[in-house]
């Protein structure tokens, strides 16, 4: 089966499309679907392009065992249609991948979006024509589409990180990547399986594989903080009780204070250790990622964060029977929450099973993959199947996979040679009329991505509507405004504990990728970009 090249089923042969339109939208995940809907409502001719055979984006590809959202389902939903919100009923506190994919499919059907999307089609090139003020977009199916505007809704976690493991191509068994999982069910019953990686996808996959495998070996490079999900079915009473919480949350999104790091984080007092411990205990029993909101300064004050780290490590020691394994599973060299915190069901307890073994690659490095398994510096492991839970080329991977040429033929890769840069995370100087949904320099993956997508799509469509009304045809960020914004993004991160981890937030998981902290962790992002629009799109050049 999968040799790390799992692709979507082909919809069948079709003639190449040669067409003109107002906007090309690349991607049909939650950002792309909403962009196609809003742009169509604006009266624009829209063509969507999607590499997969269906909508869903990340949730189309991520079909690995145990895949589910780490944000409560009732919040991990669109807010733009009250009818949609009330007609869709989530079955669990944290929805699993199949249900989230069905939700995306329902949206596509409910709002008749499929006919606007070219599936099984991957964009290869996008070229800006200065004289015509338009983009020419080409695909691997031979399509050539000319559009005045291009919206890149390519997703933050859409390009799997395929590690260059020595000898991987020699392995005789199947190799699966969590980010490109086969569409049929994989049966690990009676097999000797290895999982490489203990990030979010590994933490979700490992307990599920352990239920079937004859033997499971987990190869861990960096241990991760993980908290219990306490997942459960949602009753009608649960949904009714959540209504005030949802209303309050939606109201908070537009607040100038909304953001991962609250305004009082830098002058909040450090609570007594016992008070902290009691609060963490309460949130641990409650389940979910609420521990990151326990105190306003948990992500800015090392003294507060240290207690949280001690608390989670204490929980790991209390769950995992073998002291050496518990020690290896306990993070020690970075603060809690500065990598995306994992939310699990039975992860640490899985290591108590007699057929599950943890290999700490920091003390026992992996040297090669062989025809029959994996070798470390000290021993060999015979395997029947290999699972790579090695994450993604986050934030920029999908954009880097295309050849995007802006003014004077300059490529986006060249513009980002020293690290990604985008004004407000929305546009890049030198690339007129090219919008990026949840791009570097925006909150994106720091919070609820589906609402970050909504925010950007609404800003972009309002911008295009305003330009149309004023007879304007072109928009591009001022280089100085872009530089100033990225300096602000870096400064906001530097005032927190985020830079203290080698995380995928700054590209540390990809060899050779420039280290730039990509998400915006400051306050009031939505409020700020709305003000910029109200001030005539300050920092942009419009013609």
Image (cartoon, helix red, strand yellow):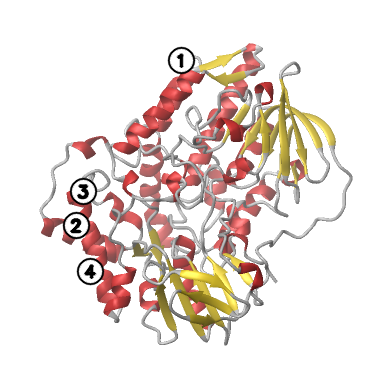
> Which residue is rendered at x = 59% and y = 75% of the image?
370
Q: Which residue is mark 1?
A: 535
Mark 3 to mark 2 CA distance (whole Å): 9 Å
Q: In the rendered image, which quarter contains the C terminus?
A: top right
At mark 4, the secondary structure is helix
Mark 2 to mark 1 CA distance (whole Å): 44 Å
Q: Earlier in the sequence, mark 2 or mark 4?
A: 2
Q: Earlier in the sequence, mark 3 or mark 4?
A: 3
Q: Callout 2 environment at 10 Å: few (<14), some (14 to 19), or many (20+)?
A: many
Q: Nearer the viewer, mark 1 or mark 3?
A: 3
> Which residue is rendered at x = 30% and y = 66% of the image?
330
> Which residue is rendered at x = 57% and y = 81% of the image?
383
Q: Callout 4 environment at 10 Å: few (<14), some (14 to 19), or many (20+)?
A: few
Q: Which residue is mark 2?
A: 307
Looking at the image, do the residues carrying marks 2 and 1 touch, with CB atoms under 8 Å apart? no
Looking at the image, do the residues carrying marks 4 and 1 touch, with CB atoms under 8 Å apart? no
Mark 2 to mark 4 CA distance (whole Å): 10 Å
Q: Earlier in the sequence, mark 2 or mark 1?
A: 2
Residue 523 appears in view: no
Residue 302 got which mark?
A: 3
Residue 309 appears in view: yes
Looking at the image, do the residues carrying marks 3 and 4 touch, with CB atoms under 8 Å apart? no
Q: Position of residue 451 (x, y in %)?
A: 48, 42
Q: Position of residue 102 (x, y in %)?
A: 62, 58
Q: Position of residue 369 (x, y in %)?
A: 57, 72
Q: In the rendered image, which quarter contains the N terminus?
A: bottom right
Q: Nearer the viewer, mark 2 or mark 1?
A: 2
Q: Which residue is mark 4?
A: 314
């Amino acid at each position: 089966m999968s040799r790390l090249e799992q692709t979507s089923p082909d919809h069948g042969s079709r003639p190449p499309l040669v067409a003109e339109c107002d906007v090309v939208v690349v991607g049909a995940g939650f950002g792309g679907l909403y962009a196609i809907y809003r742009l169509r409502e604006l009266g624009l001719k829209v063509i969507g392009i999607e590499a997969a055979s269906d909508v869903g984006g990340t949730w189309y590809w991520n079909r690995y065992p145990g895949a589910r959202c780490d944000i409560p389902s009732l919040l991990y939903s669109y807010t733009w249609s009250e009818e949609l919100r009330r007609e869709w009923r989530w079955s669990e506190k944290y929805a699993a991948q199949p249900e989230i994919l069905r939700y995306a499919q329902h949206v596509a059907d409910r709002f008749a979006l499929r006919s606007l999307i070219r599936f099984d089609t991957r964009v290869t090139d996008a070229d800006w024509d200065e004289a015509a003020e338009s983009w020419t977009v080409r695909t691997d199916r031979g399509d050539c589409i000319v559009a005045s505007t291009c919206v890149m809704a390519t997703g933050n976690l859409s390009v799997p990180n395929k590690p260059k493991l020595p000898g991987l191509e020699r392995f005789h068994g199947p190799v699966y990547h969590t980010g490109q999982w086969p569409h049929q069910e994989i049966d690990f019953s009676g097999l000797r399986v290895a999982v490489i990686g203990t990030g979010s996808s590994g933490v979700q996959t490992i307990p599920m594989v352990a239920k079937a495998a004859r033997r499971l070996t987990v190869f861990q490079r960096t241990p991760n903080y993980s908290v219990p999900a306490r997942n459960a079915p949602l009753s009608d009473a649960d949904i009714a009780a959540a209504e005030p919480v949802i209303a309050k949350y939606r109201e908070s999104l537009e607040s100038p204070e909304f953001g991962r790091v609250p305004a009082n984080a830098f002058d909040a007092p450090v609570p007594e250790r016992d008070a902290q411990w009691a609060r963490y205990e309460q949130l641990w029993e409650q389940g979910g990622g609420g521990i990151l909101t326990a105190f306003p300064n948990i992500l800015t004050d090392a003294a507060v964060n240290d207690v949280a780290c001690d608390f989670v490590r204490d929980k790991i020691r209390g769950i995992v029977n073998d002291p050496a394994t518990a020690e290896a599973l306990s993070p020690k060299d970075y603060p809690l929450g500065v990598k995306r915190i994992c939310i699990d069901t039975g992860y640490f307890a899985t290591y108590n099973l007699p057929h599950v073994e943890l290999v700490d690659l920091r003390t026992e490095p992996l040297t090669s993959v062989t025809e029959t398994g994996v070798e470390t510096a000290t021993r060999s492991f015979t395997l029947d199947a290999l699972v790579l839970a090695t994450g993604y080329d986050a934030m920029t991977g999908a954009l880097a996979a295309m050849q995007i040429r802006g003014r004077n033929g300059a490529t986006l890769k060249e513009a980002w040679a020293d690290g990604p840069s985008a004004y407000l995370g929305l546009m890049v100087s030198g690339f007129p009329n090219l919008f990026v949904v949840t791009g570097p320099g925006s909150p994106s993956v720091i919070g609820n991505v589906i609402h970050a997508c909504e925010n950007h799509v609404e800003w972009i469509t309002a911008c295009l509507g305003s330009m149309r009304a004023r007879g304007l045809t072109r928009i591009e960020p001022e280089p100085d405004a872009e530089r100033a914004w990225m300096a602000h993004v870096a400064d906001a991160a530097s005032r927190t504990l985020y830079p203290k981890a080698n995380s995928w937030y700054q590209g540390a998981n990809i060899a050779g990728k420039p280290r730039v902290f990509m998400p915006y962790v400051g306050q009031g992002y939505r409020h700020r970009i709305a003000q910029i629009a109200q001030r005539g799109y300050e920092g942009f050049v419009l013609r």
